[in-house]
Every structure is written in structure tokens, then in C-alpha cells.
Image (spheres, grey):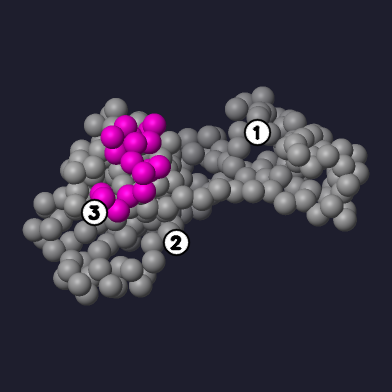
Amino acid sequence: MKLAYQSLLAGVALTVSSLALAAGELNLYNWGNYTSPKLIEKFEAETGIKVTITDYDSNETALAKVRAGGHGFDLAVPSHSHLPIWVSEGLIANPRVDQMPNFKNVAKEWRNPDWDPGRQYSAPWQWGSVGVMVDTSVYNGDINTFGIILDPPEELIGKINVTGLALPSEFKQFIDNGSSKAVALWNPIDLGYSAVYIANALASGSVTAAPGATISIGHVGEITLDESNSAAMAAPFTFDASNIEAFSKIY
């Protein structure tokens, strides 16, 4: 099934596939904690359509799952910047949002975005931005630069901590200069190790891939498949001053 698309920066897709309507169900694929329970309750009460929500934590996760097929989603909510990828790979339907009755309610500035010319594939839903604040009572230097975070002056060393998910080779400089204590990412060594364990368990028949099934993956631990037969093969690995040098040479 192809998906109708909704942009994280710009909005909710207002189309539902005919299959979902016929079955009285709507399968929504959205960022975790971005869907209002009250909105869903109101929609279900007014339409009689049951909504099932599946969460994801990144654009990359969403794209990989939809590429794999067999997902059954009707609406998806990746960021606007990823829409051209979904369109070019034929992963979504073209619901012609610009021809829908409620399109008249879309503000002019959102009607013809660069990522969706003519606004055919996506509909405005939500947008936002992230800012950085500086306490000038603590630091009185130049605050109009990200250098205070990525290349901090001496007086800020040890007082700030930049972290997140990143390649150790790209983040080593920030560990080295003291602007970060640690960063995390999935370790390809653990992922490869886990993949072998999982493949062996499935091939040998010692476990069946079904929702709720638990699969042992050696020293990494174990995973439990969710309702879509999916699970993370390993937890993110932490890189800090004790190991960033070695791992930065690997990836």
C-alpha cells in the first residue's frame, strides 16, 4: 500500500486510503508522543473509524520501515525535508491535497513549498524551530555564534555538554575539546553480532517471528518483537573519552 504523506514541518495529510475506510480502520505512522489522544478520540467518535498509531523516533527509521513494505500504514508523518525521497521512490500515493475542499483553509505561504511544488502530496500540520539561549550572567562573550558550543572558549570548558546521536569520527573533536562528555550511536559491531544471532534463531526454527516473540542475542541481551514484528537489534552505544579514539578510526 502506498501512503498519503504528512509533513512534520507543515502538516497533517487529510486523505485516507480506500482500504482503510472500507475496513473502518486508519493506520497512522507518526513521531512518538506527537499525536493527541483527545484528537484521536474525537475523530473516532465522529467517524466510527478506529485509529491505530505506530510511533517512530527518526526519519531514517520511518523511511526504512516503509521501504521494507508490508507495513499497512495509511498516513505517515516524516519531516518535510524527506518528502522528495518518498516521492521519488514511489513510497506514497498522490492524493492531490491541492484539490481537497479544505485546501482553501491553507495559508498562502504553505501552498507551494519547495519540497512539494503545488502541494500535491502533503498537507500542513505542524512546524517549529529550535533556539539556543545563553545566560549572560555566566558568559559575557560573543553569543552570536555556535562556536560557544562547538568550539567553546576556555571559560566554558566543563560547563557545557553537547550530546546526541553521532558518528564517533565526526564527534571526536568535541570530546577532545571538552564541549562534550559523551555521545551515542548504534555500534555496527553489536548490530552485526545481533544480526547473526537473530538469523540463526529464525533459520534453526528455535523461534518464530511473531508479535511478542523473544529472541536471545548473546551478550547484547534479548529483543521482543512488537506488533509489527520489529525490534531494535541493540541499544545505542556510548562513546566518551575512554573509547572515542579507537572507535573514531572505525566509523
Question: Is any part of residue 198 visible from this angle?
Answer: no
Q: Earlier in the sequence, mark 2 or mark 3?
A: 2
Q: Amino acid at mark 2?
A: Asn
What's under tag 1, amino acid-wise?
Pro
The local secondary structure at tag 2 comes to loop
Callout in the foreground (2, 1): 2
Q: CA distance from mark 3 to mark 1?
A: 47 Å
Q: Which residue is mark 1?
A: 168
157 vs 139, nearest the viewer: 139
Q: Which mark is residue 33?
A: 2
Left or right of residue 245: residue 76: left
Report the Cα–Cα distance between label 2 and label 3: 26 Å
Which mark, residue 208?
Answer: none
Q: Is residue 24 left or right of residue 71?
A: left
Residue for point 23% across, 42% down: 98
| Location of the N terminus (image quadrant) | top left
User: Magenta part of the protein: which range?
Assistant: 102-119
The answer to whether residue 46 is above or below residue 210 is below
The amino acid at mark 3 is: Asn
Can I make out residue 190 in this image?
yes
Percent of width and height locating residue 189: 54, 35
Residue annotated with mark 3? 102
Q: Residues within 10 Å of mark 3 (few under 14, many from 20)?
A: few
249 displayed left or right of 43: right
